[in-house]
Amino acid sequence: MADVIAEIKKLLKEEKLIFGQDTTVKGLRQGTIDKVFLCSNCDDITSEDIKHYAKIAGVEIIDLEISNEELGDVCKRPHNIKVLGVKK
């Protein structure tokens, strides 16, 4: 799990992360997303929506073992984060 968090921190420094469900879904539809991270307590509706579009786009989904609060802390954001997209 530590390697996934290290990857997220690296992507954050490279400014390759997209935060939130709406922008990630938009990126999946446009084909600009390479990978998606979902927090452990992501609600079912959001999770199913993201997984549907990711399957169509052929994008890898990483189910994290950390909560949305912890993901917000990892990304140095003052709010919770359910979904992260990685730009191509």
Image: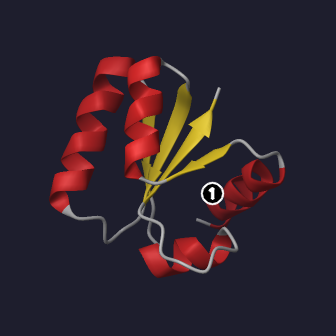
Q: Which of 82 and 79 is in front in this view?
A: 79
What's the residue type where badge 1 is placed?
Val
In this figure, what is the number of numbered marks?
Answer: 1
- Where 71 falls versus 14 (above or below)? below
Q: Residue at x 70, y 74 (%)?
A: 76
Q: Residue at x 45, y 19 (%)?
A: 30
* 78 lies left or right of 15: left
x then y, percent, for residue 81 = 48, 67
Q: Name the residue under label 1.
A: 4
Give residue 59's quadrant in the image. Answer: top left
- Dot 1, how many residues are within 10 Å of its Cα: few (below 14), some (14-19), or many (20+)? few
Q: In which quarter of the image is the C terminus?
A: top right
- Where 84 falls versus 61 (above or below)? below
* 56 lies left or right of 30: left
* 45 lies left or right of 34: left
x then y, percent, for residue 67 = 43, 76
x then y, percent, for residue 15 = 77, 46
Q: Which residue is drawn at 24% across and 53% down?
A: 46
Q: Residue at x 35, y 30 (%)?
A: 54
Give residue 78's quadrant in the image. Answer: bottom right
Q: Is any atom of residue 18 visible in this view?
A: yes
x then y, percent, for residue 11 = 74, 48
